[in-house]
Image (cartoon, grey):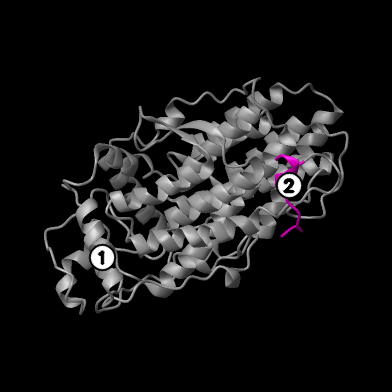
Amino acid sequence: MNTSIISRGAFGRVLSLAALILAALAVPPAMASDAADVAPDSRQNAVVHWNTIADQAFAPSQGTNPMAQSRTLAILHASIHDALNAIDRRYTPYTPGLTAAPTASADAAVATAAREVLVSLLPDQAALVQTAYDQAIAAVPDSAARNAGVDLGRAAAWATMRRRHGDGADTAAQPVYVPGSGPGEYQFTAPFDFSAQPSWGRMQPFVIDLRDHSTQGPLTLTSAQYAHDLAYVKKIGHAASKTRTPEQSEIAKFWYEDSPLGWNRIANAVVRQRGLDSWEAARAFTLVNFAMADGFIAGFNAKYKHRFWRPVTAIHAADSDGNPRTVADATWQPFMTTPPVPDYPSTHTVLGWAAAEVLIDLFGDKERYAMTSATLPGVTRQYQGFSQAAQENGLSRLYAGIHFPHAVKHGRRQGRSVGQVVARALAPVSSRRHVADAHNSVVGSSP
């Protein structure tokens, strides 16, 4: 099975993107892995542990390739979820057909499913993953239950990966994007000479029907609202802005990291705070990552349909947009590096709200938690509720000078739409208590 998700040339571009962003932020590329402790923590269930291992493995591999991260994490947690539900079927599986294995060790099944997926999709991190696996399996007594768990985890992982084989990820970098000409058309933004993953929006979603999550499109260039949006981001998102507050600058840097990493860190913290068991944790992680994976697909589908220019291009070329209310500034630069994809919608915002909607459905919107960020080490921010974090996440793109307000506004709308649909997936199959309180329980069918 070919598990590569991007071509060699595209992968080189991703590495260039990673190096540029990490260098700009002074974040060591292997920061997480260098400090990693891959031994299981007795205070965590196995699902939480392997979510943490995945986070460590991403830093030097799929770092700053959040599209790939979203797919890998969705496959990882779907495999874990299905393995556990073959032992005790509490929730609807993602991929049906696994043979029931009621006597299998849950910890062995989780560890093996995780190992198979991560080694296959992150082969350059095989050593880290194998070390974590060896330690996890050593903690499970040698028995028929352990052997059954190993067999089950392997079967679940490959069932999921076979299902996703040919989903469109392998060809997402093709065809190579060629910018159009004229006002409003997306152009490459320095320091990049390419546009990333132009066909990612054609990939097969995990849960949603793309037709149900379309967007209205960017503002008309000659409208008063467009002029207002441009003036706003021009002022607050300038590299040397005098109106952006110190906290807004902190927010821009804090939320600049890859969305799947940040929102999995939030989910991980809340799952631990709530003391969820492995089955509950597996479903929660799977839904959060389905929402983000499908959010990227829906968002990129819209990005490359509308091909709208980024603020830095628009501000430099404002004298050609046909709007008498806009003023060009050829020297303007954004506070943060503009990612190499079109502006509309803001997929960073899409993913934040998609993940938040799932978490709100599971836990309500009053959860208190603290969060750190790989792109602003040493800073911890406190939140109450998931909508607060999602709102701040979206605003960060304005403070960074890399998105128009309209792209953020419609990203919020699309993300919420995706998250609300995904939250109904993997439904409970019995009268067991749902992860959330009874009034928040979801109903629905498997994707």
Q: Position of residue 346 (x, y in %)?
A: 41, 59
Decide which of 2, 145 is in the foreground and name it: 145
Q: Quadrant of the C terminus?
A: bottom right
Q: Neighbour class for label 2 at 10 Å: few (<14), some, many (≥20)?
A: some
Decide which of 218, 210 is in the foreground and name it: 218
Q: Amino acid at mark 2?
A: Ser
Using the image, determine if residue 38 lies above or below residue 84. above
Report the span colored magenta: 434-447
Q: Measure the C-alpha gap from mark 1 to mark 2.
A: 42 Å
Please give the residue where the numbered disc 1 appears in the rendered image: 228
Report if residue 327 is visible in the image: yes
Q: Is residue 71 magenta?
A: no
Q: Is residue 183 left or right of residue 269?
A: left
Numbered badge on residue 441: 2
Q: Main secondary structure of the magenta part?
A: loop
Sooner in the amino-acid sequence: mark 1 or mark 2? 1
